Amino acid sequence: MTCDEAEILLHALIDGELDAGHAREVEQHVAGCARCAAALADYRAMSVAIATLMAR
Amino acid sequence: MPINSSGDDSGKAQRFRDAALPYLDDAYTLARYLLRDPTDAEDAVQECYLRALKHFDSYRGPEMKPWLFAILRNVCRAEFARRSGSHTAALDDMPDDAEPTPLWHEPQETPETTMLRERDASAIRQLVASLAEPFRETFVLREIHNLSYREIADIVAAPVGTVMSRLARARAMLRSAWVAGEEQQT
């Protein structure tokens, strides 16, 4: 999987929109790619922050 | 198109209330994000519910929330069109039967931790508000309303692939702004 593909699919991973096979592919890419791993971590932190904000 | 043409109006109204009223707060939240104005948001939600009631006979499901949101979206688009003309201030009346869930609380609590969180809230609100409309819309439907890609695609009348790329763009833009904001603070 390329970074370009992962860039879109990261979001589907976060949102639980991927089946197990595709989720594994994205996770494998992220495990070997510092740039996409950093993006995933940031997106997850943002989602948590927004969810927390909304829950107040 | 007469609203009172069917014989079971009270039954219809009751069914409509049961089906649609649980989403009133959600509809307000979405309108607030799309229009960025509390009074306009209330007006839009009211218009949305009037239209939804009018077309309730043609509602075939499956889900009420995406159906309502699709109507609300059209109302908000009309409001955008109106705004490009002139903006008249409406009466600032709030519904008295229910306190709408405010998106962004005004700072009322005193501890410093709360102040920090308020600053975060305000920062996030500004970031989201700064997104261009199609990206903001998709982002809010996903992040605030937790709708599936399929449901969002139905509401915005676009393919799922478009929803995915808009969401990716929206989050990427927010991330850049977010990271820049954090660097400014340190």
Image (cartoon, grey):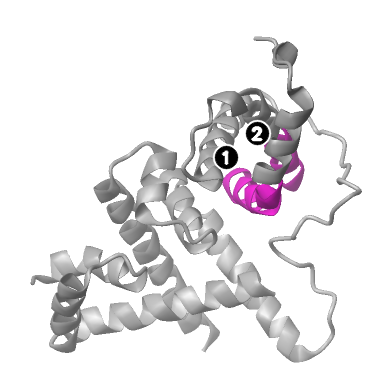
Q: Quadrant of residue B43?
A: top right
Taking B151 as reference, is A52 left or right?
Answer: right
Numbered-mark total: 2
Element type at mark 2: helix
Position of residue A20 relative to residue B46, above or below, is: below
Q: Quadrant of residue B157?
A: top left
Q: Residues within 10 Å of mark 2 (few under 14, many from 20)?
A: many
Residue B95 location (% of width, % of height) = 86, 45
Q: Residues within 10 Å of mark 1 (few under 14, many from 20)?
A: many
Stretch of the chain drawn in magenta: B21-46
Marking on residue B68: 1
Taking A22 as reference, is B106 left or right?
Answer: right
Residue B120 location (% of width, % of height) = 61, 76
Taking B174 as reference, is A4 left or right?
Answer: left
Identity, as a three-letter code, of the amino acid under mark 1: Leu
Marking on residue B24: none
Which image quarter is the C terminus of chain A in?
Answer: bottom right
**Residue at the farthest left position:** A1
Which image quarter is the N terminus of chain A in?
Answer: bottom left
Element type at mark 1: helix
Closer to the camera, B65 or B16? B16
Q: Residue at x 41, y 48 (%)?
A: B152
Q: Residue at x 69, y 61 (%)?
A: B103
Chain under disc 2 = B
Q: Residue at x 70, y 53 (%)?
A: B25
Taking B142 as reference, is B19 left or right?
Answer: right
Q: Real-space Cα distance between discs 2 and 1?
A: 7 Å
Q: Quadrant of residue A24?
A: bottom left
Q: Is residue B108 magenta?
A: no
Q: Are marks 2 and 1 in contact (CB under 8 Å)?
A: yes
Quickly name the residue at label 2: B48
